[in-house]
Image (cartoon, rainbow, N blue to C red):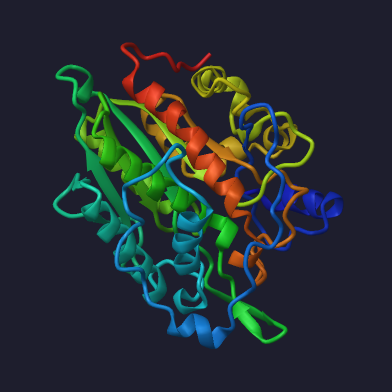
Amino acid sequence: MKIPAIQYMALLTVLAFLGCNSTKVNQTVTLNETTPVNAGAATARSTANEATKMEAPGSMPPKEFNGAFTDATKIRSIMEFLASDALEGRDTGSAGIEQAANFIENGFKENGLRPYFSGYKDTLTNMADVTAFNVVGYLEGQDENLKKEFVIIGAHYDHIGLIAEEAGDAIANGANDNATGTTTVIELARYFGSKNNNKRSILFTLFTAEEKGLLGSQHLAQRLQEKGLDLYVMLNFEMVGVPMQGKDYLLYLTGYENSNLAEVSNAYAKSKFAGFLPKAKEFNLFKRSDNYPFHEQFNVPSQTYSTFDFTNYDYYHKVDDEVSEMDFEHMANVVNRAIPVMEGIINAPVREVNYN
């Protein structure tokens, strides 16, 4: 999510840890009645040599599950590929982001998602200098009438690539920003692909060029609007790799006061899943992530869930935004607690989520 330069300088004064000219969406959600305890550094940082040798997993984690759908091990296996040094920060148009796109596409195929267009990769028409594409997977709804309505579940999978070297490292891996949101969408796609119980149709969308100014989501929102898509709600995930501290909700929701999405989310979660973060409103984060182009094109509830709260992560747009800084137990909680929320919204007999 992007912040204008004048606001960004004010943020630097207050929050010295931010090191670049834009900021991501803040959202908070609570699991049950307790905030997950940060597990700390979940894994030692891979050396550049080890990361270079890394290959994409052959498939997504298997579909079987007991109790909770996903776990820290499954989350980690996806994250260690998406945020590896081998992908060199997933800059739009790079070889690294193409590897990430191929991984996402293979996962969609293996979990029963179909292309919505002629293929899973949707090439942007608003970038002239490089070839860039979103990755879009489609699950048709199972209800004869409700399947005409669509829910979009999305995140951006690009990052900023190579930046100024620090201590011999020039790769901005983008673990929290936004391999975490990408991993969340991948796991939700795996869940719904295995259950095949969605009454409404779902588009799982991984956007490129968010870091270039929301170009991927702008392209897709315009294309779907021109196609006449009946969009019910757009649910976006951004920077969910570490828990918020001192909050009684798990995630915060951008544009919190604009709709009843938090209320609906909490009802399906049976807990304080989504809350209000004042900083998100102060910096107008509602307009700074991939939810916003869908708001502009469709004027339907289009909002972002996040756990980056301006105080709990020091490595935004830095080379230290590494997998080693992520809390995989927390991330698994986000996915597992999001499932009944997504399922409830997708399968409700009427459109419960509305702008105020």
Q: Residue at x 75, y 33 (%)?
A: 247
Depth check: 39 or 134 in front? 39
Asked whether residue 227 is in view, the answer is: yes
Q: Quadrant of residue 234?
A: top left
What residue occupies the far front of the structure in this picture?
Answer: 66
- Total number of numbered discs in the rendering: 0
Say above or below: 190 vs 142. below
The answer to whether residue 133 is seen in the rendering is: no
Q: Quadrant of residue 193?
A: top left
Name the residue at 53% across, 46% down: 332
22 vs 8, left or right, is: left
Using the image, determine if residue 108 lies above or below residue 194: below
Residue at x 54%, y 67% (from the top left corner) = 160
Image location (x, y in percent) of residue 175: 56, 62
Where is residue 178 shown, x and y percent of the image?
A: 52, 55
Residue extending furthest toward the right = 13
Point out residue 37 in the picture as x, y percentages from the top left corner. 72, 45
Q: Nearer the viewer, residue 131 or 323?
A: 323
* 150 horizontally vs 94: left or right: left
User: Residue 268: where, in percent of width, then height?
Assistant: 49, 20
